[in-house]
Image (cartoon, grey):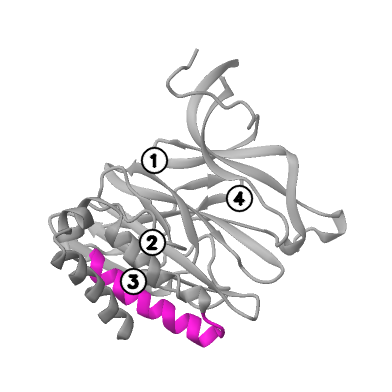
Amino acid sequence: MKTTCLLFLVLFAFLKNGTSQSIRSSSGIQDSLSKLSSRIWKQKTDSTRIHSSEVFLADLQSVLKSDFYRAIPFDSIQGITRVASDDGVLRIFTWNVPLSSGLNKYFGCIQIIRQGIVVIPLQSAVGFLSCSETDLLSPQNWYGALYYKLIQVEIGEKKAYTLLGWDGFNSDANRKFIDIVSVDENENVVFGKPVFKTAQGIKSRIIFEFAEKSNMVLRYDYQAIMVEKRNKIRKVFNWLIVVDRLVPMDPSLIGIKKYYVPSGDTYDSFIFSNGYWVLVEDIDAANRTDPQNKL
């Protein structure tokens, strides 16, 4: 409550001093939110960090619901990741609170901007273990991740949003996700959609788990790749999701994901085609090109 009051006192001071236009168009409100968010990681105990994060989430939701701040990007709040859709409909804010156990507690919210504004909090459990590649999840049973990329696509003439995210899973392993979030006409949000075509069948999301001290590539890139069609191989330019091939540190560790690391020389990808993200293996990930110059 004290933090919420402080936020609005700060905003009132800006308005009283005649700088409302500055707040609307510059970093004023984002600086105020940054001061509040920075308190989360200054706390000394798990319980106080979680409490500070819950208070900040309430404050952030209050600001995001206001039509007065609709045009502000909110892309520079300290400690908060933010992704946004090209159509201006969706913005997702996420952050994590590292705990003394080596696990993470995640917080976030989704802002939906249509005729009005709807803000939906994301609720995660600590160390979410049951998330699978086939589950369809609501914001109320979110697995928890920091999203760093949003890719807008169309599936069956409806917009959907592909997310790339990171999860500091536990003290032994990290995870990365490729997921889909969909929003219907009633602002109902669902994570997961069976649109990932892999060698193991169709999945609703892709989950990568790997050793805690390693880091894997998961990025959206414009690549020139070689494709075989009608017994001919030709170069195709396309946007795709590039992925490190993960392998066990030793053959005896097959299946124990906390011992998996990037191979270092093999990359796979997912290419969006006909409403599906299709796995294409063994690409040359160094073959990056400029989308403005395909020659």
Foreground mark, 4 or 3? 3
Within-10-Å neighbours for mark 3: few <14, some 14–19, many 20+: some
Residue 282 is situated, as x and y percent measured from the top left of the image, at 67, 34
Q: Are marks 4 and 2 in contact (CB under 8 Å)?
A: no
Foreground mark, 2 or 3? 2
Q: Which numbered disc, 1 or 2, marks the residue that appears first in the sequence?
A: 2
Can see residue 230?
no
The residue tagged 3 is 121
Foreground mark, 4 or 2? 2
The residue tagged 2 is 93
Residue 233 is situated, as x and y percent measured from the top left of the image, at 60, 16
Badge 2 element? strand
Query: What amino acid is labelled 1 in the image?
Result: Gly
Q: Residue at x 65, y 29 (%)?
A: 284
Within-10-Å neighbours for mark 4: few <14, some 14–19, many 20+: few
Residue 237 is situated, as x and y percent measured from the top left of the image, at 49, 23
Question: Does 181 sit left or right of 173 as displayed?
Answer: left
Residue segment shown in magenta: 43-64
Foreground mark, 1 or 2? 2
Question: Does 127 sit left or right of 86 as displayed?
Answer: right
Q: Which numbered disc, 4 or 2, marks the residue that appears first in the sequence?
A: 2
Q: Quadrant of the N terminus?
A: bottom left
The residue tagged 4 is 200
Q: Residue at x 50, y 63 (%)?
A: 145
Badge 4 element? loop
139, 274: nearer the viewer:
139
